[in-house]
Image (cartoon, helix red, strand yellow):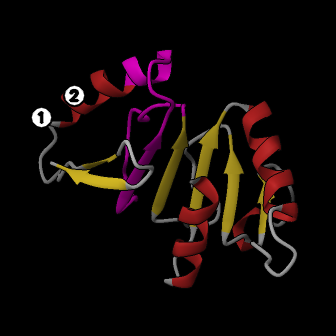
């Protein structure tokens, strides 16, 4: 799902910041190079000299060194501040500690002014359904 969201962001001319644990980011870095023979997702792990130039930046912190307006959290939850971001995607596995955290984050976001909340839930047939 993270790769699909990155592809959609790039197709829409957007920059994306992906946050998560280092091990997960390294796995995603490898997948972005190898998931399909016919495609390429320009990206980098944060901490290099060209972070600002990266359309997709993989980082352990929610600091958009690449100027991203889209934030994708890989089981890292919602950061304390969302300043500068237009949209947050919070990906997690059902039944994990990240899922429990996502529920708490969802409730906390209800009190933020100007925040529109929605989520997508996987269906039994493998598709996705938008929930509000």
Q: In this view, does 1 lie to the left or right of 119?
A: right
Q: Does the magenta stretch include residue 26?
A: no
Q: Provide the residue designation for mark 2.
A: 108
- In the picture as drawn, the residue positioned furthest to the front comes out as 125
Residue in the foreground of this view, choosing between 121 and 2? 121
Q: What stretch is highlighted in magenta?
A: 75-101
Residue at 36% from the left image edge and 28% from the top image edge = 102
Residue at 76% from the left image edge and 62% from the top image edge = 51
- Above or below, comparing residue 110 to residue 87 in the picture: above
Q: Is residue 5 left or right of residue 80?
A: right
Q: Classify 10 Å Cα crowding around label 1: few (below 14), some (14-19), many (20 and above).
A: few
* x, y percent for residue 124: 37, 42
Q: In this view, does 5 lie to the left or right of 99?
A: right
Q: Do the residues labelled 2 and 1 touch (CB within 8 Å)?
A: yes
Residue in the foreground of this view, choosing between 103 and 45? 103
Q: Classify 10 Å Cα crowding around label 2: few (below 14), some (14-19), many (20 and above).
A: few
Rounded to the nearest angstrom, the CA distance separating label 2 from label 1 is: 6 Å
Residue at 22% from the left image edge and 36% from the top image edge = 109
Q: Which mark is residue 111?
A: 1
Residue in the foreground of this view, choosing between 16 and 98? 98
* x, y percent for residue 107: 19, 27
The quarter in which the N terminus is drawn is: bottom right
């Amino acid at each position: 799902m993270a790769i699909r969201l990155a592809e959609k962001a790039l197709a829409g001319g957007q920059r994306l910041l992906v946050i998560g644990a280092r091990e997960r980011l390294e796995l995603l870095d490898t997948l972005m190079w190898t998931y399909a023979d016919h495609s390429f997702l320009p990206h980098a792990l944060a901490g290099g000299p060209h972070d600002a130039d990266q359309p997709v930046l993989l980082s352990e912190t929610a600091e958009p060194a690449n100027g991203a307006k889209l934030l994708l959290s890989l089981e890292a939850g919602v950061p304390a501040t969302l300043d500068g971001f237009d949209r947050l995607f919070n990906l997690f596995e059902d039944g994990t500690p990240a899922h429990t955290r996502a529920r708490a984050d969802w409730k906390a976001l209800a009190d933020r002014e100007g925040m529109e909340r929605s989520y997508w839930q996987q269906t039994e047939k493998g598709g996705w359904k938008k929930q509000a």
